[in-house]
Image (cartoon, grey):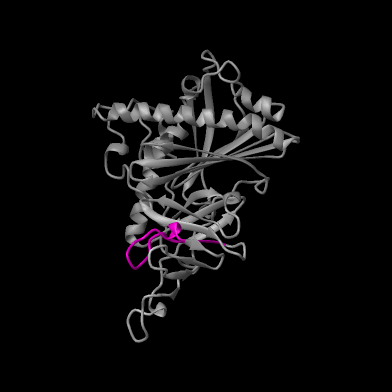
């Protein structure tokens, strides 16, 4: 599955310092916010890939997204009014339907240009799916890739937490997928002790084309040092984890009685700021009570990752020599390899091709 898998440690600087490092992929779905944050008549501002985006829910309950700058003078439309049908700019009262079409320019006299029919604000494809709002940052067309989806219990969103990482999307993504940091970054007397490291062997396979460009850690019995699973699901579950470009990780753990799904998505705000969203689904009884217990734990877990990544960012500022080892860093290699392929496919106007093949990786964690 990886033709760069060496027999020795690689002393080559990884791609977060060369070529594609820090590049924000377009033509992709990005997580914006949980759907329950928007009621009819609401609109919010988000910055995605450095672009201002207004996301709202109309009186018809449908989600929409448009560029959050008025075509007239650049004022943020989200600072204006929304009556559930049209957005009104706070500066000069220009009005726009949720499809971007301008309907009113109060200052214009008859015969002057432009008239409302001449103006259309840019809009983005948007999807409300499994309790989440996704925005497609790219060209709107009829052949959009599928929205990321969790399996089995995808309609039972229970919890959303978000943490801001002051780094580019690559460092956030590879920091979260790293398989060897758990015993150090997430050390806990409750579920991960310092002496719990042991050798692991996991089978991996490429994602099918219908699921996007990425790979999957095939279904396996959860590691014996993952006590959180046992506490949460009442026993050691079978687990499957998938990674999909540009930055989505989906985990499905199941026992004969219960299911848990976790969706983690990194959304670049700018080239140097990344919002990390974690959405949790489960079908255990007592969901409301569990949310109160799990929310602070989930936030603490994500913040531990943030602090670890920020330590790496601070170290990389000194431009040190770095390395990627086998097999623990293989998924980092895959991430950059697939990112290069996605960028090449966009440049060449073709569908991306997944070059990965099945393989078993081994590491200690």
Residue 8 x %, y % = 34, 25
- The magenta stretch spans which residues? 63-80
* Residue 71, position as x, y percentages in the image: 35, 67
Q: For the N terminus, which image quadrant?
A: top left
The residue shown at (52%, 19%) is 187
Q: Is residue 191 above or below residue 298?
A: above
Q: How many marks?
A: 0
Residue at point 36%, 82% (across, down): 109
Q: Is residue 123 magenta?
A: no
**In the rendering, at what x and y percent does residue 344 appear?**
33, 54
Q: Is residue 7 visible?
A: no
Q: Residue furthest top?
A: 195
Q: Is residue 119 visible?
A: yes
Left or right of 40 on screen, residue 330: left
The residue lying at 42 percent from left, 61 percent from top is 77
Residue 77 colored magenta?
A: yes
**Which of 228/354 is in front?**
228
Q: Where 132 sits versus 141, above or below?
A: above
């Amino acid at each position: 599955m990886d033709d760069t898998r060496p027999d020795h440690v690689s002393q080559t600087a990884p791609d977060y310092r060369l070529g594609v490092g820090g590049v924000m992929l377009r033509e992709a779905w990005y997580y914006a916010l949980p759907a329950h944050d928007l009621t009819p008549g609401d609109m919010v501002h988000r910055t995605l890939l450095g672009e201002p985006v207004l996301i709202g829910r109309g009186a018809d309950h449908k989600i929409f997204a448009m560029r959050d700058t008025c075509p007239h003078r650049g004022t943020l439309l989200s600072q204006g009014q929304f009556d559930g049908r049209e957005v009104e700019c706070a500066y000069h009262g220009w009005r726009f339907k949720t499809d971007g079409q301008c309907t009113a320019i109060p200052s214009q006299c008859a015969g002057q240009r432009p008239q409302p029919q001449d103006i259309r604000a840019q809009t983005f494809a948007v999807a409300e799916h499994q309790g989440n709002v996704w925005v497609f940052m790219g060209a709107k067309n009829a052949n959009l890739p599928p929205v990321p989806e969790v399996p089995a219990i995808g309609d039972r969103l229970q919890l959303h937490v978000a943490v801001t990482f002051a780094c580019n999307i690559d460092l956030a993504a590879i920091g979260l997928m790293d398989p060897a940091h758990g015993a150090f970054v997430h050390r806990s007397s409750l579920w991960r002790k310092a002496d719990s490291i042991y050798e692991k062997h996991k089978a991996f396979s490429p994602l099918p084309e219908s699921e996007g460009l990425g790979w999957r850690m095939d279904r396996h019995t959860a590691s014996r040092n993952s006590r959180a699973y046992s506490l949460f699901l009442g026993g050691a579950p079978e687990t499957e984890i998938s990674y999909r470009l540009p930055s989505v990780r989906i985990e499905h753990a199941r026992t004969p009685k219960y299911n848990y799904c976790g969706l983690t998505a990194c959304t670049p705000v700018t080239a140097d700021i990344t919002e990390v969203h974690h959405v949790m689904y489960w079908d255990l009884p007592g969901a409301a009570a569990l949310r109160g217990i799990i929310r602070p734990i989930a936030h603490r877990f994500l913040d531990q990752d943030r602090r670890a990544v920020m330590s790496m960012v601070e170290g990389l500022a000194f431009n040190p020599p770095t390395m990627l080892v086998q097999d623990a860093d293989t998924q980092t290699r895959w991430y950059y390899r697939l990112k290069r392929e996605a960028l090449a496919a966009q440049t060449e106007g073709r569908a991306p091709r997944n070059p990965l093949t099945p393989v078993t990786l081994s590491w200690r964690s």
